[in-house]
Each structure stands twice: as structure tokens, then as C-alpha cells.
Amino acid sequence: MTNTSLSFLTLLCIGTTVACSRNGAPAENKQDDVVSVPATVPHQYGGWYCPDNLGGFPAVDILDWNDVPVVNGRMATQEETQNGTSLIFVDAEKHPDARPLDLKMPRLARFFNVQSDKNELVIVIQALAISSDSIVGFRYLNGGNGSARFDEVTLLSDDAISRLTPARFVQFNIPIQAGTDAVWTVLTDDEFSAPLQAVFDPENALESDWNQSSEVNFNYPKSGAITRAFAGDVWGNLYIQIDCQSEQQQYVEKFLLSGILGSNETTLHIACGPYEADFNEQKSILQKWAEEVKILSESTQFQADISRWTWRINSPQDSGC
């Protein structure tokens, strides 16, 4: 994706129709630590909201935010905008006045995202001045990336950072020998809610209509209330994002399907969290759940292949009559 003289290079970018969000901030981060900036006209230097870019910018555990790769003291190269180090490449010949801001990165910050109506926790990995604008590029702690004007982010103080709970994200990829349509059906269709529920709810404690308020056949009991949800096609890839808010935390689930159209090979990308003391338990549950999705999807694909094969055998066109 290019913008004449600048490039914002990512794997996937969700448009403004995706407003997946949780309102407010975690209990550990008091609201006087952040400042909500009124909505402004988006800048023109690569301001895409890409929470689905889990390959380019995976989720980051809170204890590891300071270890992400960055470029300090100079402008990013085009290669660095492609390898997960930076976001915006500036053509120096067309913009000779562009320069890096005097800001040592990475920096943890809050960004009021007008598309999700919430203060997002982000890691600033790029800051530059170009023409009359000061721009920052950042990665969301829960995966994906975005950018904004410098005055639209609020850098967190050391004290605010010290009060963050050291939560972690479960994230992994699982290959599935089935088309994306088959996997999507298993993830979202009510027909598959019961076998998948048995994995994360073995005691059958959920109410019978638990899946009516969710976009996916999965449930985390401590997630809180669903505030925003999206499930659909994003630039040719199927994607689900569910955001929740409880008194204790903001929680998000991201499920991305990538595969070649018409093939029977799909990769399910999962990023969920953050989790605290129950991290290992939820990691195990999500892995078992994903394995069940794989089994059901491959079985569904097999049955679909058999149906097509049977139809062709019985078709007058194929019978030689």
C-alpha cells in the first residue's frame, strides 16, 4: 500500500468499518494517567488502523514492551518498514525536510482510538516530523499497528508503567488442511458450538444461549461484557475480533484465517488476552480448542469433497449417457 511519497507497509489493514473496542482503561491505570484527545482529521502519512496485522506486529507481553525493535536517531529504511521494525518510509528526495523527532523509543503510551472509542495501550516505535506534522507509528500491545499525530498520544510516566499488571497474551498459529470457508463455518456456525464448548466448558456451566452474543464459538468466563465485535472479510482474509471490558481488565480475542483461495490449506492465527495468573490454563485450553477446530474443519472439508465427488458420479454429464 503506497501513498505517493510514503509507504505504510503492513500485511493487512482493517478499514474504518471495524470498530472493535473496549471502553475505558484497566483498573491499574487510573484515568488521570491518560488524556483523551478530541477526534481530528486523520493525517495523510499512513494512518491505517490494522489490529489484524498479527504477523507483522504480534502481541507483546507487558513485561516485554521495552524489547521490541525500533529505529532511533534517524529515518527508517524501506527494509525496516517491511521487517517489523518501523512503519512509515519517507522518500527523502520528495521530502528533504523530514526528520526524526527527538524521542528515544520504544515508549509506552495511550492512544484514544476514535474507531474503537477507547484509550488503547500502544508501543510507540517511530516518531518523525514531516512538513507541518509530527507523526508517530505504533504497535498495539494486543497485536497489530497504527499511527497518529504526536499530540494524539499520551506517553505514560514511569509510575504509570510500574502500576501495569504484568499480563501475557496467548498467541500461536495452527495449520489446517481445509479451505477457509470450512474453517470459518466451524468458528462461527451454531452447529459447531456444542463440540467446541466441551473443550473450554467441560462442566457445561454456560447458559444454553451463550453463543448468541458472540461472533465465535469460544468463551472466556472472565472476559467481561462484550463491547465491540467484528467478523468478516478483511482484504481477502477472514478475521474475527472481540473486545470485552470488565472491572479488572480489557480483554481481546483475535482470530485470523489466511490461505490461498481455492486451496485446502488454511492457517488459523490466534491472539487472545491479556491473562494473568490463569495464563498457562488458558493457553492449554486455547490450544485444545484450536485442535478441535482443526479436526472439525478437516472433517467438514472431507464431507464436502465426498459430496461433490458423489454428485459428479451421479451427474448425467459425467455418466457417459
Image (cartoon, helix red, strand yellow):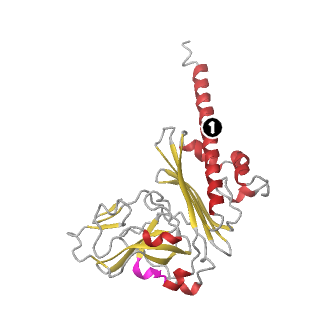
Give the percent coordinates (x, y) of residue 115: 52, 70
Q: Is residue 136 magenta?
A: no
Crowd class of label 1 (few under 14; some 14 to 19; many from 20; radius 10 Å)? some
Residue 20 in view here: no
Give the percent coordinates (x, y) of residue 100: 30, 77
| SS for callout 1 | helix
Work out which residue is located at the far left of the displayed protein and give it. Answer: 93
Which quadrant does the C terminus fall into? top right
Side of 269 relative to 190 (left or right): left
Q: Determine which quarter of the picture holds residue 307.
A: top right
Give the percent coordinates (x, y) of residue 150: 40, 80
* Front in this rendered view, residue 128 or 30: 30
* Front in this rendered view, residue 85 or 301: 85
Q: Which residue is mark 1?
A: 300
Side of 167 relative to 235 (left or right): right
Residue 88 in view here: yes
> Residue sitting at 45 percent across and 56 percent down?
55
Stretch of the chain drawn in magenta: 149-157
